[in-house]
Amino acid sequence: MKTKFTLSIITAMAIFPNCVYAAEWVETFDGSATLGATGTIKFDDWGFAGPGGRTAMDFNPINGFGANPLDPAGGVGQIQHVIVTGPDGLAPAGPDYLPGYMFGVPYTEDKLGDLSAGGPYPNSNMDSGVSFFQWAYTSAPGSTFNNMQIDYDGDYHIAKDDMTFQLYNYFDYEQIGTTGGLADGRYYTKLAFKPYALSDAKGWCGSILASHPNAHEVMAGQVAFDFAFDVYYQFAPGSYSYMSTEITSGFKMRSYGDIAVDITTSGGGKQVLNARAVVNNTDPVANLASVAVGTPVGDPDLWHNRVSFMGADVLSVGSVESGSTGNCGILTSKWASGQIGPTSKKYETLIPGIPDKDSCIAVGGEWAVNAFAGYAFILRADAERVIDYFDEAKYGPDPMTLDTDTDGVLDYKDNCTMVANAGQQDTDGDKYGNACDADFNNDGFVNSLDIGLFKSMFMNTGDSEADINSDGIVNSLDLGLFKGMFFQVPGPSGVAP
């Protein structure tokens, strides 16, 4: 059977501002439901916690979702959507299978090429990639989670029909760190997979812990839902024959942390897969495991609302929850009418608690048995988050559109947010513009020590630190501004650390 996640290791190596220790959660497979495949899936949460202190294993809403009368907050405070952008070669690396560098250090690893003649793929960049068993696939751009509703408690709700996945039928191979061997390029796989949701998703979104839902700060979230993928044999690109449908219930996807899959098949084969997330608003080359919640990492013009999400599982023979050897699904109208192919999906939803095939047929369902039981997989994609709505009365105006001093430079990139300085002159390069920085010795405070430095620059022309008004000369006009900043700290600045 597959056990529930349990907290197995708590590390004190990294303590985050919310006082949560980094935790490793372990899911154990004893082989009874996975055709003898045994091992673990481990998830390192980096110390992230959701609204209300919810952990990586907490997916249920607080007091019900949204407009539910049990929810004292009531209503939906945010709506967003996430769209997969495809590989860019920039996501952080993990040993064994993600992109080519872990904090600047190249790694060596091969991925197999499905059942095709192309491959293995040495030193593969698996940015925006999927590993199924030992095979490599690419998450094509266009998969979308739409209408992602978030209530004031930070609860997620996403309708199953608002989650759409592209077909997985190729691998975009990019060799990292070496030359020669298989040519870079797109390789179409013999097996193709079309994923889809079988239930609504629930979980939590950490954006309500930030200063604003659209702030350029580290955020994370997670959802769980029943999940399936129809499997096709691909004779040639675009030519398919249906093989099976694989179902996993309670599939978990997160936008933070590390996943490590270590599964041994009944025949002794190893499935060792790893994935690392790119937390929202974060430069993907950063060491994400040491990033504190609530801080921005990287240029917001490049990384704002860039995110990844990922999940892992080992396919069971049937329903783990009911202990049966299959799942009872309701066919879609397209499939029932003979429209079989990657443009449709086989099942509309699952009927829970059905123990066997006869009982399933009796309630109008079709019995589904996973053909790939014992196979592990990681689904990972790089994406962009878009805020479609937020309650401005609750959260305030969008910080990414504010220009408080009306100088034409938005606050998040303005080195003096409260003083108009369209030229952004910053002579000492400390990310505080001259217009709000009379701290000439950079000790964090304007005091008598800065007076002598101001005097030494008096009547200087050109680019001078003491040219506070940026008129090209340090004179009495700057002296008045200097006096006004006495006993003050520099800034505020939208770009200073």
Image (cartoon, helix red, strand yellow):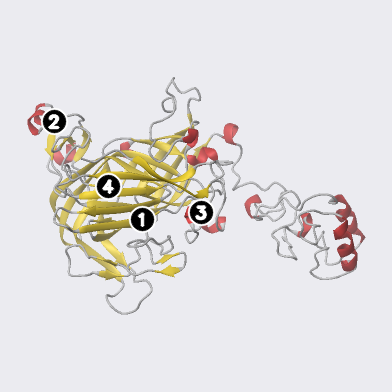
Q: Earlier in the sequence, mark 3 or mark 2?
A: 3
What amino acid type should be assigned to the residue bearing mark 2? Answer: Pro
Can you see residue 181? yes
Q: Earlier in the sequence, mark 4 or mark 3?
A: 3
Assign the N terminus to one quadrant of the image.
top left
- Check disc 2 and report the residue beneath it: 355
Q: Position of residue 479 (x, y in %)?
A: 90, 58
Whether residues under marks 4 and 3 lie with C-beta atoms below 8 angstroms apart, the answer is: no
Residue 481 as seen in the image, left or right of residue 2 = right
Q: Earlier in the sequence, mark 1 or mark 2?
A: 1
Q: Position of residue 167 (x, y in %)?
A: 26, 53
What amino acid type should be assigned to the residue bearing mark 1? Answer: Ala
**In whole angstroms, how far apart are the C-alphas of marks 1 and 2?**
34 Å
Question: Which disc is residue 313 wearing?
Answer: 4
What amino acid type should be assigned to the residue bearing mark 3? Answer: Ser
- Check disc 3 and report the residue beneath it: 290
